[in-house]
Image (cartoon, rainbow, N blue to C red):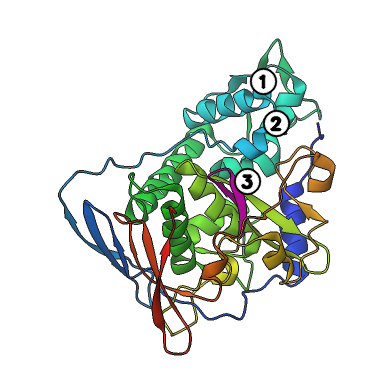
Amino acid sequence: MRSFKTISVVLTAAILLSGCTVNRTSVSEPAAEITTAETTTEVTTTAEATTTTEATTTTAAEVPIEFNPHPYSAKLAESVNEDCWQAFYNLCDAMRKGEDSFECASEEAYLWATDPATLLKLFPAACAKVEQKDKKGKIPLKDGVAKINYLIPAEDFVKREKEFEDRVTEDLNRYVKSSYSDFEKCVALYDYVTAEYEYNYNWDIPLDEGADYYAFMNRKGICGELGGIYAYMLLQVGVDALTICSFEDICHAWTYVTIDGKSYHTDPTWGLRSGYNDGKMFFTYFMMTDGERASDGPNMEELAISVLPEYWIKDSGKDFSATDEKYCELRFATFSRMDTGKNILYYLKGDDNTEYEFHYED
C-alpha cells in the first residue's frame, strides 16, 4: 500500500501544464427530449446561463434519488480490500457528523481511506480539509481507532458537506430518473456534465480547496476534475466509474465506465458544449473502445488511476481494457431523443442529419 502522497495536486498540475484542453469538436446544449413509459421530460439550456427547465407529465411516481455517502466501484475493489473500504466509509460517516475519530482496522486501511486522491475522487468535500498525519508526522491510529485531523472547524466541515450533498441530490434528480438503466444514466449524466460545466482556462482553484469539489460547486474545471465529476455522479447512481489519466504522448484525463460487465472510455471534457452555438450533444467521445481512445493520442500502455494503490494500471495486474464495440455506431453522431420505454436512442448522422435508431438493450 502506498504511503502519503499528494497525488491529486501533482496529477492535476501536470495535466494543466501539459496542455489539457477542450477538444475541437463543437457540441452544446443538453439533451432535448428523453421519454419514458411513465414520464416525458424536456430539458433546455440557454447559452448565457446553464439553467435547466423541465416539463414533466407523470403517470407513475418515480422514487427520488438520494445522496449515497458510500460510493463504491467494483473495478476498484479488485485492488482495494474490504478493510480499506470499511475504514473509508467509517471516515465518511464520522466526518458527516463532525466527529473526531473513526474505526480503522490497520495502517494500510487508514492510508488509503485518508489519501488525498481517495478523498478527491470519492469524498470530494473532504479533500484538502483533513491532514493525514498529526503534527509530529505520525499516523494517528491506535487500538483500531483513528483520529481525524480537521483543517477547518468540524462544524464548518459539516455545513460544507451538507451543501455539497444537497447540490449533488438536486442535480441528480434534475437529470436522472430512478427507473433509468445504467446506459440511460450514462447518457443523462453525460448530458449533465457537458451542458452544465465550462472549461476552467484560468485554473483558479484555491490551494485549500479540493479540485473536484471546487469544480462541482463552481461549474468549471479541467479534464481531471470534469472526468472526476462524471465518475462521481455515476457512482452516486450505482454505475461503476473511475477517473483515468494519461501522461505519455498526451496529458489528459477522462472517465472509465463499466456497465453490463463491459468497460468503456468516456471523455466529458472533449464533449463540453460551452462556447459553441450549434446546440448539439455529440457522442464522439462517449463509450469508446481502447482503439478509439488511442486514436486521440494517449499511450494506452501508460495510463494511471489515482485511487489505485499501485497508481499505474500496468502495475496493478488488473484488467482495465475497453474492447466492446457496441457503441461504435454512435461515433460522430449527435443526440436527437431517447425513448426509455422502448429502449431506443435516436441520433442524427450525416450531412442531411438523417435520424437513426440505436436499440441499446439488444
For the residues labelled 2 and 1, say whether their Cβ atoms are less than 8 Å apart: no
Q: Quadrant of residue 303?
A: bottom right
- For the N terminus, which image quadrant? top right
Q: Choose the circle earlier in sequence order: 3 or 2.
A: 2
The residue that appears at 65% across and 23% down in the rendered structure is 82
The residue that appears at 55% across and 55% down in the rendered structure is 214
Residue of label 1 = 146
The residue that appears at 61% across and 81% down in the rendered structure is 24
Whether residue 45 sits left or right of residue 250 in the image: it is: left
Q: CA distance from mark 1 to mark 3?
A: 20 Å
Residue of label 2 = 80
Q: CA distance from mark 2 to mark 1?
A: 19 Å
Are there few (<14), some (14-19), or many (20+) residues within 10 Å of tag 1? many
Provide the secondary structure element on which disc 1 rests: strand
**Residue 127 shows up from this direction:** no
Disc on res. 120 = 3
Whether residue 68 sits left or right of residue 289 in the image: it is: left
For the residues labelled 3 and 2, say whether their Cβ atoms are less than 8 Å apart: no
Magenta span covers which residues?
256-265
- Between residues 321 and 85, which one lies in front from this camera angle? 321
Three-letter amino acid code of the residue under disc 2: Val
Foreground tag (2 vs 1):
2
